[in-house]
């Protein structure tokens, strides 16, 4: 049994409706969650897993594609409730996830705060406070570009820097599926760079999206946007 299950986590921020797509990788020995939503999202993700007919208590690992708060916000809650879960991330992202280095997104937001008009400073401060509230978690397994894990019959770690320096995507070889994280988002049925205005290294982000488009994949699962088939 080897399954790749896309979760649809719908939510509201104020009047804005949005959806994110964490992914479950499941085989006979593993049940892995790829990215885990905003702070406080653990119950919602548990319910989404349950609706797919799976037991969320059987999670063995959580892989974090990068340290942005919408991808690791509920990580500490999962680790506290299920201490046996192993946390997986890239060697480069690990210090930001563990808190030994300051979040680059927070650095960016604090720098931007200085340039905001007075009427937008309160919103900017609130965003900085949200980023500061994300709790650090120890990374148990550190991976690098090109590593091949035995999950789902062979899962390749694909280094896709740009959005953040150590961003990773996943290529599930025998299913020809790429889980993009934020290396690509789906907009108008096109794979495009996520939030280019906030991407930390646009040149690398462009190289990374070209890299994953060059893989022998026919399905791309985007955290923002959902499933793209070519």
Image (cartoon, rainbow, N blue to C red):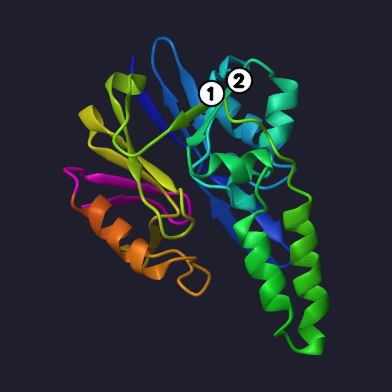
Q: Residues within 10 Å of mark 1 (few under 14, many from 20)?
A: many
Which residue is pictured at 29% across the width and 35% down the height?
146
Q: Secondary structure at mark 1?
A: strand
Which residue is pictured at 24% across the width and 53% down the height?
211
Image coords of residue 162 (percent x, y): 42, 60
User: Where the N terminus falls, by quadrant?
Assistant: top left
Going from N to C along the chain, the mark reached first, 1 or 2, is 1
Which residue is pictured at 59% across the width and 30% down the height?
139
The residue positioned farthest toward the top in the image shown: 28
Q: Secondary structure at mark 2?
A: loop
Q: Which residues are magenta?
A: 215-230
Q: Count of labels shown?
A: 2
The image quadrant that residue 62 belongs to is top right
Say which of 42 and 207 sits in front.
207
As for residue 92 lying within the magenta part, the answer is no
Q: Are marks 1 and 2 in contact (CB under 8 Å)?
A: yes
Image coords of residue 30 (percent x, y): 45, 16
Image coords of residue 147 (percent x, y): 32, 30
Residue that mark 1 sits on: 61
Q: Residues within 10 Å of mark 2 (few under 14, many from 20)?
A: some
Distance from the alpha carbon under mark 1 to that under mark 2: 5 Å
Residue that mark 2 sits on: 85
As for residue 218 lying within the magenta part, the answer is yes
Say which of 14 and 151 sits in front.
151
Q: Is residue 76 left or right of residue 17?
A: right
């Amino acid at each position: 049994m080897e399954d790749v299950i896309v979760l649809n986590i719908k939510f509201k921020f104020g009047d804005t409706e949005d959806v994110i797509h964490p992914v479950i990788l499941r085989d006979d020995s593993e049940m892995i969650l790829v990215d885990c939503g905003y702070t406080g999202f653990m119950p919602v993700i548990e319910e989404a897993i349950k609706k797919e007919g799976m037991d969320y208590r059987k999670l063995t690992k959580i892989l974090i594609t990068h340290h942005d708060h919408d991808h690791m916000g509920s990580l500490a809650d999962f680790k506290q409730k299920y201490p046996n879960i192993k946390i997986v991330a890239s060697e480069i992202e690990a210090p930001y996830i563990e808190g030994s280095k300051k979040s680059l997104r927070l650095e960016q937001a604090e720098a931007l705060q200085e340039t905001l008009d007075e009427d937008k400073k309160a919103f900017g401060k609130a965003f900085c406070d949200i980023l500061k509230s994300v709790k650090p978690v120890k990374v148990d397994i550190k991976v690098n570009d090109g590593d091949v894990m035995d999950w789902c019959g062979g899962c390749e770690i694909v280094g896709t820097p740009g959005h953040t320096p150590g961003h990773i995507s996943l290529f599930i070889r025998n299913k020809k599926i790429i889980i993009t994280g934020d290396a690509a988002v789906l907009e108008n049925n096109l794979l495009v760079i996520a939030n280019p205005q906030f991407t930390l290294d646009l040149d690398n982000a462009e190289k990374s999206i070209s890299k994953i488009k060059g893989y022998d994949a026919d399905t791309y699962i985007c955290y923002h946007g959902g499933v793209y088939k070519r």
